[in-house]
Amino acid sequence: MSGEIEAAGELATGALLGRAFEPGAGEGHGGGHHMCLNCGTALIGPHCHACGQAGHVHRSLHAIGHDLLHGVFHFDGKLWRTLPMLAWRPGDLTKRYIAGERARFVSPMAIFLFSVFAMFAVFSWVGISAPTDLNTGNLKPVAAIDFARKDAQNDLVSAQKNLAEAKTEAKRAKYREKIADAQDDLAGLDKAAKSLGSGDLHVETTEAHTGWHALDHGIEKWQKNPALMMYKLQSASYKFSWLLIPLSLPFLWLLFFWKRQYKLYDHTIFIIYSIAFMSLFYIVVAVANAIGLGGGILALAALIIPFVHITRQLQQAYQLRWFSAILRACLLTFFISWILTLFVLILLALGMFG
C-alpha cells in the first residue's frame, strides 16, 4: 500500500513539475474580472496583457483538486495532440517545435519531467525496484559491531597516547579510566560478535586502501549496507535523470557536426523528446508485463520499437534518407550504451561521495 501511495505521489509530482515548465501560450480559459487581481491592469481578454495572469481565479478546494487532475491528465489538451505525434511522427514534432510551433504541443521539458516521474511511479507500483535482500545472514549486526569496535579501538589508542603525554597524576588517572572503559567495550563487542554464531572475535569487513579517503569511505559504505546504497542509486536515477540530456548531446552532435544548419538547441530538443517517448514506452511495457501480457513478443517489442522510433525521429527531424537514418540510429544506439554507463558511474560517485 505504501508503494502505491509513493507511486501516486511521484506521478503527481512529475505532472506538477511538468506543468511548471509548460508555457502558457494559447491557453485561454474564458473571461474573468474587469481588473487584474495581480497588477490592477484593466483586462481586455481572458489574461492580463501586462503580467500574464488569468483573469478568472478560483478560491476553493475543488479548484485545487481540479488543478491537480488538470496537470496530470490534461495539459490544456496539448498532451493529446502531442502524444500521437511523439509516438508516430517524432521527427515532425521535433522539427515543428524547433521551427516555433509551440502553443499546440506540450513543451519538451514539461513532457520529459512528466514522463520520467511517471515511469518511476509505475515501476514502483508494479514492483520494479532496487533489491532489499543484498545483506545476507548477520551482515547488518556484524557491520554495526564493526563500526562500534573501530570507535572503541580509536578511543583506546587516543587514551594511551594522552596517558603517555600527561603531566599530572590527575590526568593520568583520568586516561587510565578511559583505557579501562575502552578495553571493556572491546571485550563486550567481541563477546557480542561471538554470540552471532560465527565464533569470530575479529569482526571486520574488507577495507579499501586506495589512498583517497573519500573513495575508501564510499567503498566501505557499499560494503556495509549494499541494499541501502542500491535504494539511493534508484532514487538518484530519476532525480538526476536530466543528466541524460547533456550526456547525450555530444554524441548526437557528432552525427551531424558538419551540418551547420543544425544547432545544439535542435539536438537538445531531439534528445528530450526521445527520452520522453522511451519513458512512456517502458511504462506501457511494465504495465503489460504486470497484467500478464509478457513473454517473448513483449521482450522483442521492448528491443525493436525503441530502435525503430529513433530511426524515424532521425529521418524526419533531420530530413535524411532511410539508409542514412538507419546507419545513424545504429551508431546512436551504440552511443547510448556509453551514455548509460557514464550516467550510472556518475550516480555511483554521487552515492559514494555524497
Image (cartoon, rainbow, N blue to C red):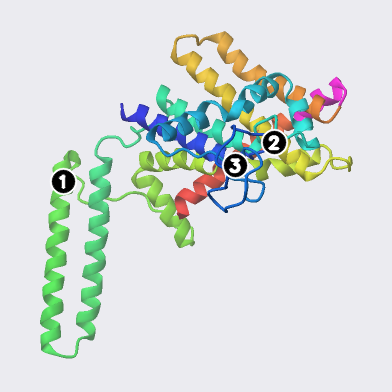
Residue drawn at x 47%, y 55% is 353
Question: Which numbered marker is on residue 194?
Answer: 1
Disc 3/disc 2 C-alpha distance (Å) = 17 Å
In this rendering, position of residue 317 left or right of residue 211: right
In this rendering, position of residue 142 left or right of residue 130: left
Question: Where residue 67 appears, x then y in whole percent?
Answer: 48, 33
Residue that mark 3 sits on: 21
Question: Where residue 287 appears, x then y in whole percent?
Answer: 48, 17
Query: Mark 1: which secondary structure?
Result: helix
| Relative height, residue 301 to residue 252 (above, below) | above
Residue drawn at x 59%, y 32% is 29
Q: Quadrant of the N terminus?
A: top left
Residue that mark 2 sits on: 271
| Relative height, residue 68 to residue 343 (above, below) | above
In terms of sequence position, does the residue under pointer 3 or pointer 1 come before the other? 3
Residues 66 and 231: in front is 66
- Looking at the rendered structure, the kind of residue marked 3 is Phe
Question: Where residue 31 appears, x then y in whole percent?
Answer: 59, 35
In terms of sequence position, does the residue under pointer 3 or pointer 2 come before the other? 3
- The magenta-colored residue range is 320-331
Query: How many C-alpha atoms fall within 10 Å of the one at disc 1: few (<14), some, or many (≥20)?
Result: some
